[in-house]
Image: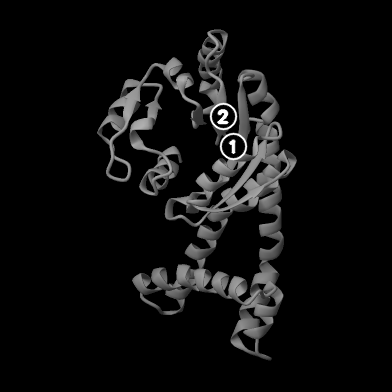
Amino acid sequence: MAEALLEPWIADGLIAPEAIRAVVGSAASRDRWATATLAGQSLRVSTESREAWDAPVVLLAVKPQQLEGVAAAALQKATEDQGKGLLISILAGVRLDRLRQLFPSRTCVRAVVNTPALVRQGLTALAWADAPAPEARDWVEQLFRRVGDVWTLPEPQLDAFLALTASGPAFVALMVEALADGAVAAGLPRALAQTLAPRTLSGTAALLEGKALHPGQLKDMVSSPAGTTLAGLRELERAGLRSALLEAVLAAAERSRALA
């Protein structure tokens, strides 16, 4: 996800590539980053974690199990009267109170961003440990607006936001796959079905948003008496699709809370 965020930030001129240092945890990661380009630019790469803490802004995108080692390097920098500035964490399951404890010299903000950010259709929620300076708040929001829409939320709402927007693409992908399989079973060529299924969902989403329709309104618009749509809806209700989706979001939110 760090690469998905950095590329548009560089391409749009928000951050100069020479101002970025990618600090990684292994030689393999170093070699991969050293040969990679983002927006046509190469980055400086290091495996020395202490180097990250010279920067005024740190994007924390390590694995949760690497967090303690990263924090130790940050603490050493802080004792040298360095390491102050902004920390943006995209780690799942690491709360603001933990970030504040590990990085006491930094202004900490959590960002929950979903995978459609890869095509600049992302949804991001921000939660701040403390009230930020207006300039810092505006700058961080500007960064994430480059990959989609942004909301600032109280931290307790991030679990539900993650369940809907970050886990949601997997739920939607499963529905797209099932719709395509159904179309193949009904007689369409697979290639065509796999083209039509995601476009059906994207077109429906555009209609809901563009016309400000409640989902129930759209459902009724395409449901003729004794027609094909109602025949299909009856099967979905019989199979419990509505309840299954609701429970999937709740389960993802509960798992997010449990990871903290």
Q: Nearer the viewer, residue 49 or 106?
A: 106
Q: Is residue 33 above or below residue 159?
A: above
Which residue, as the protein is rendered here, is positioned at the far left?
35
Q: Amino acid at mark 2?
A: Leu
- Residue 241: x and y, percent? 66, 64
- Which residue is drawn at the image coordinates 30% and 31% (left, top)? 32
Q: Amino acid at mark 1?
A: Ala
Q: Is residue 257 left or right of residue 111?
A: right
Q: Is residue 211 left or right of residue 35?
A: right
Residue 133 visible to the viewer: yes
Q: What crowding class fits label 2: few (fewer than 14 Cα within 10 Å), some (14-19), or many (20 or more)?
A: many
Which residue, as the protein is rendered here, is positioned at the far bottom?
225
Q: Nearer the viewer, residue 55 or 195?
A: 55
Disc number lying in front (1 or 2):
1
Quarter occupied by the C terminus: top right
- Which residue is drawn at the image coordinates 39% and 24% (left, top)? 24
Q: What crowding class fits label 1: few (fewer than 14 Cα within 10 Å), some (14-19), or many (20 or more)?
A: few
Q: Is residue 61 above or below residue 47?
A: below
- Residue 231: x and y, percent? 63, 82
Q: Disc 1 vs disc 2: Cβ atoms closer than 8 Å? A: yes
Secondary element at image label 1: helix
- Which residue is drawn at the image coordinates 59% and 37% (left, top)? 136
Q: Nearer the viewer, residue 137 or 163?
A: 137
Q: Nearer the viewer, residue 88 or 18?
A: 18
- Tag on residue 86? 2
Disc nearer the start of the sequence (1/2): 2
In 3D space, how far apart are the residues under numbered discs 1 and 2 (Cα atoms)? 8 Å
Secondary element at image label 2: strand
Q: Is residue 228 above or below residue 60?
A: below
Disc 1 marks which residue? Answer: 136
- Residue 200: x and y, percent? 50, 73
Q: Quadrant of residue 100?
A: top right
